Every structure is written in structure tokens, then in C-alpha cells.
Image (cartoon, helix red, strand yellow):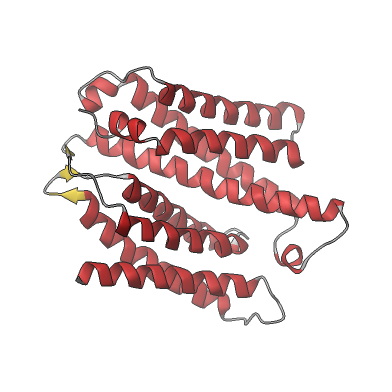
Amino acid sequence: MIQLIFHVVAIALYGLAGVYYWRMLEPAVANPRDRVWATAIGGVAVLLQAGLLVGDVDHDGHLMLGVGVILSLDAWAVAAIFLVASLRKPIMSLGAFIMPSAAVAAIGQIFLPASSAGTPVHDPWLVAHIVISILAYSLLSIAVVQSLLLWIQETRLRQRHPTQLLRSIPPMETMETLMFEMIQVGFVLLTLTLISGFFFSEQIFGTPLPFTHHSILSLVAWLSFAILLIGRRQFGWRGLYAIRWTIGGFVLLVFAYLSAEFLFKLVLPG
């Protein structure tokens, strides 16, 4: 019961932080202290959920995962990385989308509990693989949120109908630069995830990784981001073209991550 109460409090804090971030998008109602309150409340929510996730994931040295916990863990990592990055980067507007998403994922943690089967987590390679995988997904998640905002910006500007939202977020050039910075780091981490998963699966998980449609999706997602980064460097890809590649690669990655068979074969084998 106590744990459920803490879950509800974390969800409420994420929602409240999201409200403050939304207020920052509306200069007419924004308060100079909104940024402080949004960051502080979001930080408390992240810390509280971190404790809940530790309790849900680690059971007597065994890793307990399920779709709900995976979603919540990824959303938590996205929120945590966003809060840290927002201290140095002009990405505060993303909080209006990230915090409510973290609240929704935390709800999933309640109604979609961890699996009943566990895997020992004594092997540091397994822990490293999971941590790198989550960080890669989180950074690419933030990048795709930025790409969606860029899509809205470009569409509205083409129609010559700028909205208050567009006036409240950084210029397109800044947002695009930040998006590619996130993609570059996320791509490196995704590469390490695939290397550890495909080439060291037997050492990490005790069984060779089968070459299924799930692993193929992961490779295609990796290839999509590789093409995007090469296109950006060699041909100066930007705008809607780059946005579509970003969203497309991320969608493939989501299908690979959230497939139940993928989770149980890659993270919780046999």
C-alpha cells in the first residue's frame, strides 16, 4: 500500500512539473520562478521513481522486468537526462512533453508489473548492457521529441502561421543542432548495445542470440540513424528530411525494444 502511495505521488509530481513547463510556453501566464519550480518538482519525481524502480527491478539479486517496468524505466531515464541537460542546454520546452509522458509510463508501472521470472544480475556485463541500452533509447527519445517540435515549427512557418508555442522555443537552427548532438551520442550507445547483444550474447546471457525479426529491426534502426548522420555530415541533411529519418529510425527501435519476445530473449533469456 505504501509503495502504491509513492507511485501515485511520483505520477502527480511528474504531472505538476509538466504543468509548470507548459506555463513556460505561454509568456502571458509564465512566472520567472516557473523554471525553478519545474526543475525542482521534476527532480523530486525522478528521485522518488528511482527508488521505486530499484524495488521493482531488483529482487534478491534477480532482475525482474516486464513491459510496464521497461516503459517506466526508459521514461525515467529520459526525464533524468532531460533535467540534467536542461541545466546547460536551451531545451526547457521539451519538458512540457517529457514530464507528462513520464507520468503515463509510471502509471504503466503500476498496472503492468514485472515478470515473475528473474535473471541473476551478478554479471557486470549484463548490467552494463542494460544500462547502455536504456541510455541509448533515452537520448534518442529526447532527440525524437525535438524532431517533432521541429516538424511543428517548420510546418507552421511554411504556412506563415506562427503560434505562441513557436515563439517560446529556441530557433530551429538551435533545436536542430541539439537534436543531432543527442542522436550522435545515442547512436554511439546504440552501437555498443548491439555489439554487446549480438557478439557477446553467450557470455552475457549464457545463450547465443537468435537471429530473429527483432534483431533485424534493431539493425535496421541502427542503419537508419547511421544513414542520417552520414547524410548530415556529407550532404548537409536538415529540415523535414532529417526529421523523417529520425522519427523512422526511432519507430523501428521502439518496435524492437517493446516486443515481448525481444525483451525475453535479449534481456531475460530462458
**Along the horizontal axis of the image, is 29 left or right of 21?**
right
The residue nearer to you, when weighing 155 against 89, is: 155
Height in image: 82 above or below 195?
A: below
- Who's the residue at 46% across and 53% down the image? 78
Q: Position of residue 229 (x, y in %)?
A: 63, 31
Q: Is residue 238 visible?
A: no
Q: Is residue 268 visible?
A: yes
Indicate the quadrant where residue 233 lies: top right
Query: Which of the image's four quarters has the N terminus?
Result: bottom left
**Along the horizontal axis of the image, is 150 left or right of 198?**
right
Q: Position of residue 47 (x, y in %)?
A: 34, 65
The residue nearer to you, when weighing 119 against 264, is: 264
Q: Position of residue 85 (x, y in %)?
A: 52, 57
Indicate the quadrant where residue 49 lies: bottom left
Number of numbered labels in the structure image: 0
The residue nearer to you, when weighing 64 against 198, is: 64
Height in image: 225 above or below 54?
A: above
**Along the horizontal axis of the image, is 66 left or right of 172?**
left
User: In the current view of this chain or complex, which residue is farthest to the right?
Assistant: 160
Query: Which of the image's four quarters has the C terminus?
Result: top left
Q: Position of residue 166 (x, y in %)?
A: 75, 62
Height in image: 238 above or below 32?
A: above
- Who's the residue at 15% across and 38% down the image? 122
- Who's the residue at 71% across and 67% down the image? 168
Indicate the quadrant where residue 136 lies: top left
- Who's the residue at 75% across and 50% down the image? 173
User: In the current view of this chain or complex, which residue is farthest to the front?
Assistant: 111
